[in-house]
Image (spheres, coloured by chain):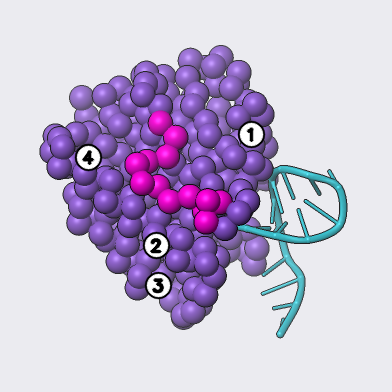
DNA sequence: ATGGTGGTAGAACCA
């Protein structure tokens, strides 16, 4: 089974690219982030024609996550238990909502995650990001306590660069989100709960990224960040026999600012 | 030092 994740930065703008990607790499399950559309706007037919079922949750034009699967799409769940709600605390703030979608695909519990960006170290969204990650860690730890053999994949845009080598120049990020100690600790806590980064061993750094800012020629200058991850439970991680970042997808006109991450699971 | 680009929008806001 081939599982992939991609922050697509608008599914309507890039439906053709996503369809071509699915076919080019023969992908079975694709988790998408930043779909940037309402449920009724999702171009389901494009993917239905290719044999994929679609689950999507998009609160507004901001964010939104989806799962496409041609190996079953069952027990679809919006949000994980205990996921903190931004709007419940602060009033309407659609940019901070609807960022987790779970489904069982081919025996694997797949979670498409868009971790809150955080904006700046002083912004309330930063505290929300840490709170959100702590809740995810707690709930995901519970899944493994319940069933240590569970096959779970936590995939998506984590908006965290866990290691210094995961950004092109640490000095640029001295007072920025994504690299702060609390964010890295929050990411590590999920790892410590039993979810391993299954891609890094197959795509080691430095200089290996999943995101390049549209501005300042970041991609041709090879100035990127590794912020998209596939974290796997022990039973899932044991099945991974190949993984790669499809850097080619970042090239050319009409690319997302993120590249897809692809993982192969042995039968 | 701001703006560089691209998305949703249809003005500003977000990444």
Q: Disc 2 to disc 1, how far (Cα)?
A: 26 Å
Mark 3 Cα shell of 10 Å, populated few (<14), some (14-19), many (≥20): some
Labels 1 and 4 in the same subunit: yes
Quarter where residue A154 is shown = top left
Mark 4 Cα shell of 10 Å, populated few (<14), some (14-19), many (≥20): some
Q: Residue A53 has which mark?
A: none
Q: Earlier in the sequence, mark 2 or mark 1?
A: 1
Chain drawn in cyan: B
Quarter where residue A235 is shown = top left
Q: Earlier in the sequence, mark 1 or mark 4?
A: 1
> Whole-percent x and y of residue A245?
41, 46
Residue located beneath label 1 in the image: A38
For the residues labelled 2 and 4, say whether their Cβ atoms are less than 8 Å apart.
no
Residue at 55% from the left image edge and 21% from the top image edge:
A47
* Residues rendered magenta in the picture: A77-89
Q: Which is nearer the eye, A115 or A157? A: A115
Q: Residue A180 has which mark?
A: 3
Is A161 above or below relative to A157?
below
Residue located beneath label 4 in the image: A143
Quarter where residue A3 is shown = top left
> Whole-percent x and y of residue A129?
44, 60
Residue at 55% from the left image edge and 65% from the top image edge:
A119
Residue at 51% from the left image edge and 38% from the top image edge:
A65
SS class of the residue under badge 1? loop
Is A183 above or below relative to A77?
below
Q: Is residue A245 visible?
A: no
Q: Quadrant of the N terminus of chain A?
A: top left
SS class of the residue under badge 3? loop
Residue located beneath label 2 in the image: A130
């Amino acid at each position: 089974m081939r599982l992939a994740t991609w922050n697509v930065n608008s599914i309507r703008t890039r439906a053709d690219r996503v369809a071509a990607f699915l076919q080019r790499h023969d992908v079975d399950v694709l988790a998408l982030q930043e779909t940037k559309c309402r449920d009724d706007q999702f171009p389901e037919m494009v993917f239905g024609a290719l044999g994929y079922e679609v689950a999507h949750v998009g609160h507004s034009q901001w964010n939104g996550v989806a799962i496409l699967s041609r190996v079953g799409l069952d027990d679809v769940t919006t949000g994980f238990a205990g996921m903190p709600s931004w709007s419940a605390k602060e009033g309407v703030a659609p940019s901070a909502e609807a960022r987790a979608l779970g489904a069982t695909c081919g025996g694997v519990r797949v979670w498409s995650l868009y971790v809150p960006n955080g904006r700046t170290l002083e912004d309330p969204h930063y505290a929300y990001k840490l709170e959100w990650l702590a809740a995810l860690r707690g709930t995901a730890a519970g899944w493994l306590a319940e069933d240590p053999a569970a096959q779970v994949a936590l995939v998506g845009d984590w908006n965290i660069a866990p290691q210094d080598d995961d950004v092109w120049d640490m000095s640029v990020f001295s007072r920025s989100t994504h690299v702060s100690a609390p964010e890295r600790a929050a990411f590590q806590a999920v790892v410590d709960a039993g979810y391993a980064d299954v891609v890094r061993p197959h795509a080691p750094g430095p200089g290996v990224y999943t995101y390049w800012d549209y501005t300042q020629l970041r991609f041709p200058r090879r100035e990127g960040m590794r912020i998209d991850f596939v974290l796997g439970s022990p039973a899932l991680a044991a099945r991974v026999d190949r993984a790669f970042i499809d850097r080619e997808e970042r090239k050319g006109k009409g690319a997302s600012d993120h590249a897809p991450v692809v993982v192969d699971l042995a039968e």
